[in-house]
Image: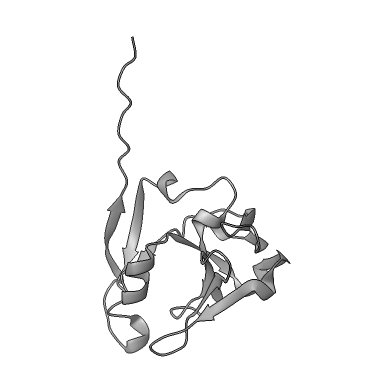
Amino acid sequence: MNEHPQTHDAACHCGAVRFRVRLSRGFETARRCSCSYCRMRGAVAVSALLGDIEFLQGEENLTLYQFNTGTAKHYFCRTCGIYTHHQRRSNPSEYGINVACLAGVSPFDFAEVPVMDGVNHPSDGRRGSGLLGVLRFVPETEPARD
């Protein structure tokens, strides 16, 4: 476990929304979710406590989307449409941060990403490990050059 959480600069695609975030356990919390919404969104998210995000620019440019129970709050840039973060249903004291918004980070930097079972959500009284599976990224090897 990282004793000194990492701070990252972050932004949406168009740069209208810029923020700084301190990840609670670095990239150890990277995961995806299988709920109907996250399945379509496809983002890899990492964790930050609610007080560990600081908007530097464009917070007013964020738009909110909620569905089902309305507990989770998903935020997007209203200009470019990029999902930046969400307040989690599984732990409302945390944000899930889109790793693709972090400067210098790509979802393809993770060889394996756990996929959490968001269809059978623990908040609905469902039991189980919560882990549905693992998504793997295996990059093509570059052909030898003569």
Q: Does any portion of residue 93 appear in the rendered image?
A: no
Nearer-the-camera pick, 142 or 46: 142
Q: Residue at x 32, y 75 (%)?
A: 35
Q: Which residue lies most toward the top here?
A: 146
Count of number-bearing discs: 0
Q: Residue at x 61, y 55 (%)?
A: 3
Nearer-the-camera pick, 52 or 137: 137
Q: Residue at x 30, y 22 (%)?
A: 143
**Where is the C terminus found, in terms of image quarters?**
top left
Image-based side of 78 in relation to 143, left or right = right
Q: Does any portion of residue 107 appear in the rendered image?
A: yes
Q: How is the image coloured?
A: one colour
Q: Residue at x 65, y 64 (%)?
A: 17
Give the quarter of the image for residue 142.
top left
Image-based side of 132 in relation to 73, left or right = left
- The location of residue 43, given as percent across then percent down, is 42, 61
Nearer-the-camera pick, 52 or 13: 13
- The location of residue 56, given as percent across then percent down, is 73, 63
- The location of residue 6, given as percent across then percent down, is 62, 53
